[in-house]
Image (cartoon, rainbow, N blue to C red):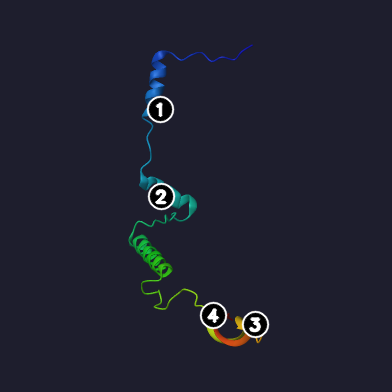
């Protein structure tokens, strides 16, 4: 057994559709009064579209620009000092004993290679 409701007559269906379309909506004042009566106080809506929002947006934009300039090393927050790491290395003059080969003629007239010790200054890089 199926419980089927009879289809409404066409004039009734049209009337029902017309009533649904013409459903009255309460005005904003009525809604506000009812909220105040039911909730006790009106809900406050926070918006940033006024002067407070414009001030916050301007302060945020200025902070972002100053931060960008500081990262680039220019502007009021950037220093005038060089930001590159300095070298902790120096060149030091060191005297070393080196053996230099020399061609020598002996007493018998033969040539041979002899080594002579000599002090030679040399620049050496020393890092700390």
**Which of the two discs, 3 and 2, labels the residue nearer the N terminus?**
2
Check disc 4: other Cα within 10 Å, few if <14, some if 14-19, many if 20+.
few
Q: Are marks 1 and 2 in contact (CB under 8 Å)?
A: no
- The single residue placed furthest to the front in the displayed view is 108
The circle on residue 33 is 2
**Which of the two discs, 2 and 4, labels the residue nearer the N terminus?**
2
Q: Which is more foreground, mark 3 or mark 1? A: 3
Q: Which is more foreground, mark 2 or mark 4? A: 4
**Which of the two discs, 4 and 1, labels the residue nearer the N terminus?**
1
Picture quadrant of residue 43: bottom left
Depth check: give the residue in front, 9 or 127: 127
The circle on residue 89 is 4
| Residue beneath disc 1 | 20
Counting from the top left corner in percent of width and height, residue 99 is at: 63, 82
Q: Measuring 36% from the left and 29% from the top, which residue is drawn there?
A: 22
The circle on residue 109 is none
Cα distance, mark 3 to mark 2? 117 Å
The circle on residue 114 is 3
Q: Find numbered disc 4 in the image and state the secondary structure of the residue it sits on.
A: strand
Depth check: give the residue in front, 55 or 11: 55
> Where 43 falls versus 26 (above or below)?
below
Cα distance, mark 3 to mark 4? 38 Å
Depth check: give the residue in front, 57 or 82: 82
Cα distance, mark 4 to mark 1? 89 Å
Q: Which is more foreground, mark 1 or mark 2? A: 1
> Where 121 falls versus 20 (above or below)?
below
Cα distance, mark 1 to mark 2? 25 Å
Counting from the top left corner in percent of width and height, residue 48 is at: 38, 57
Counting from the top left corner in percent of width and height, residue 59 is at: 37, 66
């Amino acid at each position: 057994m199926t419980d089927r409701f009879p289809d409404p007559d066409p004039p009734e269906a049209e009337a029902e559709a017309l009533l649904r379309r013409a459903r009255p909506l309460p005005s904003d004042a009525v809604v506000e009064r009812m909220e105040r009566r039911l909730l006790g106080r009106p809900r406050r809506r926070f918006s940033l579209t006024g002067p407070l929002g414009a001030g916050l947006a301007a302060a945020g934009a200025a902070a972002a620009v100053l931060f960008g300039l500081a990262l680039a090393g220019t502007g009021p927050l950037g220093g005038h000092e060089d930001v590159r790491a300095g070298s902790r290395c120096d060149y030091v003059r060191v005297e070393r004993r080196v053996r230099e080969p020399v061609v020598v003629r002996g007493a018998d007239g033969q040539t041979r290679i002899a080594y002579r010790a000599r002090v030679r200054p040399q620049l050496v890089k020393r890092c700390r």
